[in-house]
Amino acid sequence: MTYEETGSKINEDLQKLVAFRIETLLPPNLKLSVGSYGSFSKEELIEHIQKGDEIGQAIMESHRSFMKALMSGEFTDALVSAVQE
Amino acid sequence: MKTGMIITMPRHDQVTEYLSQFSAEIIEEADSKGISVRRLEDSEANSESFEKAVKKLDYNFLFFNGHGSSTEIMGHKTWIIMLGKNESLLHDRITYARSCDAGRTLGFKIIQDSQRACFIGYNKPFQFYTDDNWSSTPLKDNKARLFLEPSNIIPISILKGNSAIVACDKSKKAFMKNIHKLLKERTEGAYLLAGALWNNYTAQVILGNNKARMI
């Protein structure tokens, strides 16, 4: 697989993962406001992610960043530091 | 420069309605401290009214609610601050922009041109969840409160006389404490809400004179 193909596959997997997480975890009465893009219901969020448009990319980037922080320990360090105080 | 706060409170969509309503406690804090506040509400949240207010009152703390981009801070359906047009109005003052992305480019330009200026904002889209059950009474929406209370801590802390950096630290801690609360209580959707709080925690930036105080 080339570098570009790998990147494209990762993005596709991330799309599926984020869409699945929102589908299974987000209560139907909650909406997410994303910057200047507006406010989105569960169904709208999944639609944007599946389209991979600007809004979808912004949401996926946010999830990617959070997962990276969890895996690296950055999130745990920040949480422990805040709670200890 | 005089001690006082100019606050913009546009209300043309659900997002700005929430931001403006949650700003009430900030105005209460200013009132309790006897600090003058000039509110630019609804359609008055525009560049012309803002410029008049800044020039006439010369207040040292500016708090913007609204949408934004890397080069603009928006008011009520129009821009209030635009890079290349009127960002000099923010020189030498403390600015808190609860507006997306303004911390990416606009903020840097301001502190580049003004050594005394301090700019606090976000370098990624600010996120918050809202509960449809409370959308007509935002102040009762405890999901939105998880996000907007920590961001309120910045102006409240500055109004109490803390430096900008202390205000930001308090705000960031509050975001993390809310994450801890969500995960501990296993609130429905906790993981997703925690992710959005983390987004705001990491996106918050303070640029320039971080020891700046308004009092």
Image (cartoon, rainbow, N blue to C red):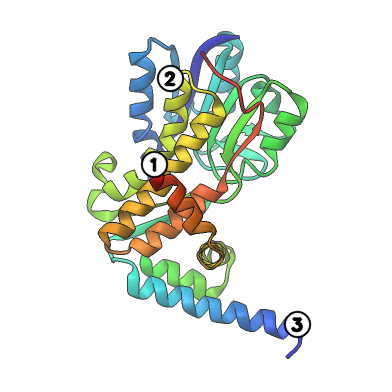
- Within the image, what quadrant is residue B114 found in? top right
**Which chain is home to disc 2?**
B
In the shown orientation, is residue B191 left or right of residue B118?
left
- Within the image, what quadrant is residue B47 found in? top right
Q: Mark 2 or 3, which is nearer the eye?
A: 2
State which tag comes first along the sequence, 1 or 2. 1
**Which chain is home to disc 3?**
A
Q: Mark 1 or 2, which is nearer the eye?
A: 2
Q: Which residue is mark 2?
A: B160
Q: How many marks?
A: 3
Secondary element at image label 1 = helix
Would residue B92 be seen by someone viewing this image from the given angle? yes
Dot 2 amino acid type: Lys
Secondary element at image label 2 = loop
Circles 1 and 2, Cβ within 8 Å, touching? The answer is no
Q: Which residue is mark 1?
A: B148
Crowd band around label 1 with a 10 angstrom C-alpha radius: few (<14), some (14–19), many (20+): many
Q: Residue furthest bottom?
A: A1
Q: Residue at x 55, y 45 (%)?
A: B100
Q: CA distance from mark 3 to mark 1?
A: 41 Å
Give the vertical position of B32 relative to A24 (above or below): above
Q: Which residue is mark 3?
A: A3
Q: CA distance from mark 2 to mark 3?
A: 53 Å
Q: CA distance from mark 1 to mark 2?
A: 18 Å
Dot 1 amino acid type: Leu
- Within the image, what quadrant is residue B26 found in? top left
